[in-house]
Image: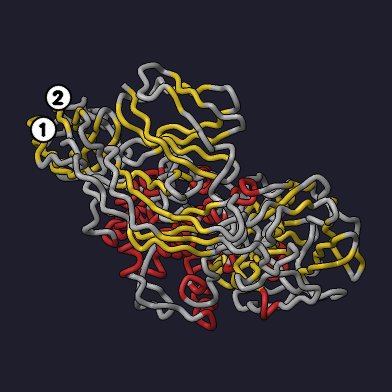
Amino acid sequence: MKKLLLLSLLTFSAFIHSQESYYDGLDFSKSGIALKADLATRITSTHTNFLVYTPGVWEASKATDVNPENSSEVLLIYGYAASGELSRTRGINDNGGNQGEWNREHVYPRSLGNPNLEFVGPGADAHHLRPADVNYNSQRSNTIFAEGSGDSGNVSGGWYPGDEWKGDVARMMMYMYVRYDQVCLPSRVGNGSNASTPDDMIDLFLKWNVEDPVSDFERQRNTYHNNTSNTYAQGNRNPFIDNAYLATRIWGGDPAEDYWGIFTTQDDEAPTTPTNVTVTNITTNALSVSWSASTDNESVSGYEVLLNDNLAGETSSTTFNVQNLVPNTDYAVTIVAKDVAQNKSTPSTAVNIKTLADTTAPSVPTGVSISNQTGSSFQVSWTASTDDSGILNYEVFLDGNSVGKPTTTFLDITNLTPSTTYVVTILAEDIANNTSDISTPVNAETTDGSNNISEIFFSEYVEGSSFNKAVEIVNLTSNNVDLSPYTIKRQSNGIWEAPLSLTGRTININDVFVIINTDAIDVKLKAEADLEVPNETPMTFNGDDRVGLFKNDVLIDIIGDLNGTDVFSQNETLRRNSDVTGPNTVFNIQGEWSFYPINTTSDIGNFNGTLSTTNPILEGFKMYPNPNHSNRLFFNNTDVINITIINVLGKQVKSSKIASNESLDISELSNGIYLVKITSNKQLITKKLIKN
């Protein structure tokens, strides 16, 4: 927040001292997820006073958000555009819910939590509750944060908090994530990418943290809440206000300011190279490594353990255990020392070892069961096998013929014959290609195909932030359904508008059809879309617009009460309950639908396990040459496929989209064993790649 008078150097030094004392005992030689975990423990254990929303948060805000230039006022986050001018303050006691007053803005919107933050716990955490103008706060609503410039306001695809507030917002989002973990994911509240971070932190907030440094206004909030003699103090602090560089140390990105001066020094001298590297306890898939400590002109902050030049892990000690290795495989083990300034030593002399050969087969799959039988399909599931090196995949057989190699413990099998009994058996394969014995045979019988389900229907409705809008249709009938007779319409103010034609489209048995607004920014919606519709009717519905499924222009299913005009489902996701098997022209909101928070899209593309895991595109799929002695990998795909390559340490090392007759350059991969995940049309197979 670039906005307020700076404190004196003396006062600032006092801040630094108090901030460091709060973190006494923490090991700041750590970085990444390890440092994040330690900070989470500290800010959770010191959060001793859980405020009530009323009056606790009101009173805390009147103490922490006082305008330093006028103690009878509070500062408004985002500012407020009144008569074309930005109003940044309100009277300290002008709080409430009426026009001209200020209220408590959940900077992390309640409905974007997982689950809804409500008004207790994270929903009443004062570190993200700020004074905001009532009307302007309503305008922001639950819109996710997005890049912009200048003053705050709506931007394409989201809400920009303004140049002077974006750093505050970023650091609040970081606090909420570290404090509440999966409940407050940055990826749900901001329009950005987490591809370069080790978790769900997004680049947008890292960027804002750098561009808008911490202000003394933010620091006064931490000072108040850390002092438990204050009635409405929580007891904990926001670490990223105390030192914005902590975000850089955890998540990377461009360096933020290091207010403590312990991470970004003028030190450019690297530690000495680790010596006496010793590898012990070598098994089929693990080893232990130890070494003599390095020295440094300042101090050694930690070590990197590398296998075949790939990072296996980091530690502040001189021992490390490595797991998830490949049996009977050569590894070169090296150690690199580093200091707090991120100077790194040269790698130690490599110790070459070979993991033990694995000759032990996995245990036999048990608990094989059959479910979801139709005239042409059923699902097979089983209890996971065990193995000393790790399971690579399973192989499922029908009447002795292989029908799939899933990595999960279930498989949906389709294209079967009605009223037919099949013998199902399964074996497990480990990463060393040892296979278990065949499981005990289980009979599976398809139905006669007459499941009494004769019509398709809506299975999901997403009324998310901005253009994140989608509807899903499911086919539980016994036949593939031609969608040509079907249309979708929006009803606004009781009037059915222009129809969306589905001519030329088909839904297969036990599959779903997902329609989204083409301007949607949700990654899951984009990935699962079967049809993208321009930003026009019907895919511009809001919480008071009804959506109807028509067949031959006759309404057969509806989301929302017919001819109603009130809001029935705004800023949330509706999912049809799993026991629903057909359409309904009467919207039974209590009996047939379940509600989920805004932008909940995790189940889109699937209804009650209907999505098939077999796919003609991947049947008979080949990847060659394998073992690979060259720098190119070829595939026999006839459609676009997504390739993800993972090394033996579980780290993604390459990702690419490959069209038909294209090859993949793997020259940057070191020799070794990799898992290659191939996805196409929502389907997945995994293959092992040997590069030498």
Crowding at dot 2, Cα within 10 Å, few <14 / some 14-19 / many 20+, comes out as some
Please name the residue that numbered disc 1 is placed on: 277
- Disc 1 + disc 2, Cβ < 8 Å: yes
Q: Which mark is residue 324?
A: none
In the image, what residue type sits under mark 2? Thr
Q: Residue at x 21, y 41 (%)?
A: 285
State whether residue 533 is above or below residue 83.
Answer: above
Q: x, y percentage for residue 337?
A: 20, 34
Circle 1: is it few (<14), some (14-19), or many (20+) Cα within 10 Å?
Answer: some
Coordinates of residue 533 in the picture (x, y in percent):
78, 48
Report whether 313 appears left or right of 150: left
Residue drawn 31% across the image and 69% down it:
45
Percent across and percent down for residue 257 are 41, 43
Report how far apart the C-alphas of labels 1 and 2 lie in the structure.
8 Å
Judged from this view, the residue extending furthest toward the top is 630
- Quadrant hosting residue 317: top left
Residue 321 x %, y % = 18, 44
Residue pointed to by mark 2: 349
Of residue 71 and residue 30, the one placed in the foreground of this image is: 30
